[in-house]
Amino acid sequence: MEVGVRALPVLSVITFFIGLILALQGAYELRKFGAIHFVADAVAISMTRELGPLITAIVVIGRSGSAFAAEIGTMKVNEEIDALETMAISPVQFLVTPKFLAMILMLPCLTIWANFMGILGGSLFGVAQADFSFLGYINATVDALFLRDIITGLIKSVMFGMTITAVGCSEGLNTGVGAESVGKSTTAAVVISIFLVVVVDLVFTSLFFFAGKG
Amino acid sequence: MISLRDLRVSYGAREILHGINLDVRRAETLVILGGSGSGKSTLLRTLVGLERPSSGEIWLRGKNLATISDKDLDEIRRKLGMSFQSGALFGSMTVGENVGLPLREHTKLEDSTIEIMTRLKLEQVGLGGFEDYYPSELSGGMKKRAAVARALSMDPEILFFDEPSAGLDPIIAAGIDQLILELKQAFHMTIIVVTHELASAWLIADQMVYIDKGVIIAQGTPAEMKANPLPRVRQFFDRVAEPEVEQEMDYLQMLTAEHRRPVRR
């Protein structure tokens, strides 16, 4: 819940703008070839395959990955992790597992929403500048997309979710002593997550590329 | 009940406990005294399995904690209760949920049974009716009591306290001492308390040990300890400050930074 629903407003605005930006940038190049009506395809494909999952992941890192590290780090500093251990309750099972499930479930959902908002953002340009009617733009989008585009994006988002949780929680659990170290873990969680998400993105994108070719 | 044989514990390359030998009998209250950085908290953490010894043996319920598997350690931990210095209650749960957590995780009891047992435990520590409060809504003394209730929830055989009266005013601290005495009398529990509060130590202890720089330098009943002639022990009991500079050589060494660094923790 915390991971998902509360992220919606900010994610919606960001991806709407990203969709609009994509359309503007795409149109700049497409216009030269007199192919401005391909702007719908450009936005649709880049959103679903790449930017939807990636932007969602980055928003979620900022909101939840950092929060995981801060929450678990604070628990570590307050001896709460020790308390769990002395009660024979595994901190990983008790704290990390629910976060994993939430992430694996929510990140793809958020990604679908992000894709939708991005396409909506693109349509604003399409309607205003490229002689599309709104329905025409949506139809062009639907025609341009293959199910594979959406699925590969969603697979990536699941991988991103796992990465973000793993990094956030392990940074939290490795927090040292004192309030200051909570801040350090939180920062580390964000920086490492962004880096690893991009690496995972590269790995899976190339995997899909070569698998698709073969 | 508990036997320690030549127990050594290190953090990295630094050895904190240098060979501790200690026996705790059933239904006895042992108070571990020592200054800051003496290693008394490390000893307590080792006893509940939060730190692994680098060598030596810890015999508890017939098992050696130094070589035990994680699964067996968890088995033993269900029979231990630990009250942490800060209370270590989970802030996102109510007091009742905190106290009921071990039961919820380790038993198949019905929710209604767990609720009753939770109320019972809270009643025992004088917090009846507070089960729906969040830890942030409680005072320091109440948090400590709630933490004790949680430690009691699995009906432990051994109860550990880390600085039970630290940060509490004398009246509340006396209340916690009273609680420990009541638990001892009512349940014949083995209780191990780490503290540097002398007033409470005299009151609750059957046996005392004094740890200095990672070794036990004095041991005995409160009466024996009061009569202990060791200067280091006397200094602690009589609240005498550390002489600022003991010798000129030490002073020189301090200036040239070759002295041993003060031990934290």
Image: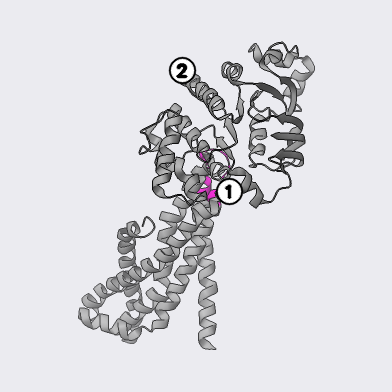
Residue B171: assigned label: 2
- Residue type at tag 1: Asn
| Residue A119 in the image, given as x and y percentages of width and height | 30, 74
| Residue A177 in the image, given as x and y percentages of width and height | 57, 39
Q: How many marks?
A: 2
Q: Which residue lies at the image location 46% right of the left edge and 17% below the top edge?
A: B171
Give the distance between the C-alpha atoms of the residues marked 2 and 1, in whole angstroms.
38 Å
Q: Is residue A158 visible?
A: yes
The residue lying toward the viewer, choosing from B106 and A17, is B106
Helix, strand or loop at mark 2: helix
Residue A133 sits in which quadrant? bottom left
Residue A174: assigned label: 1
Circle 1: is it few (<14), some (14-19), or many (20+) Cα within 10 Å? some
Residue A190 vs B235, above or below: the answer is below
Q: Is residue B90 visible?
A: no
Query: How are the colours assigned in the image?
Result: one colour
In the rendered image, the quadrant that contains the N terminus of chain A is bottom left
Residue B258: assigned label: none
| Residue A8 in the image, given as x and y percentages of width and height | 32, 61
Residue B208 vs A104, above or below: the answer is above
Residue A186 vs A98, above or below: the answer is above
| Residue A120 in the image, given as x and y percentages of width and height | 27, 72
- Residue type at tag 2: Ile
Helix, strand or loop at mark 1: loop
In the rendered image, the quadrant that contains the C terminus of chain A is bottom right
Q: What chain is tagged by disc 2?
A: B
Drawn side of residue A82 relative to residue B207, left or right: left
Q: What chain is tagged by disc 1?
A: A
Magenta segment, which residues?
A: A171-186
Q: Kindly report the secondary structure that dominates the magenta region of the rendered protein.
A: helix
Drawn side of residue A120 relative to residue B163, left or right: left
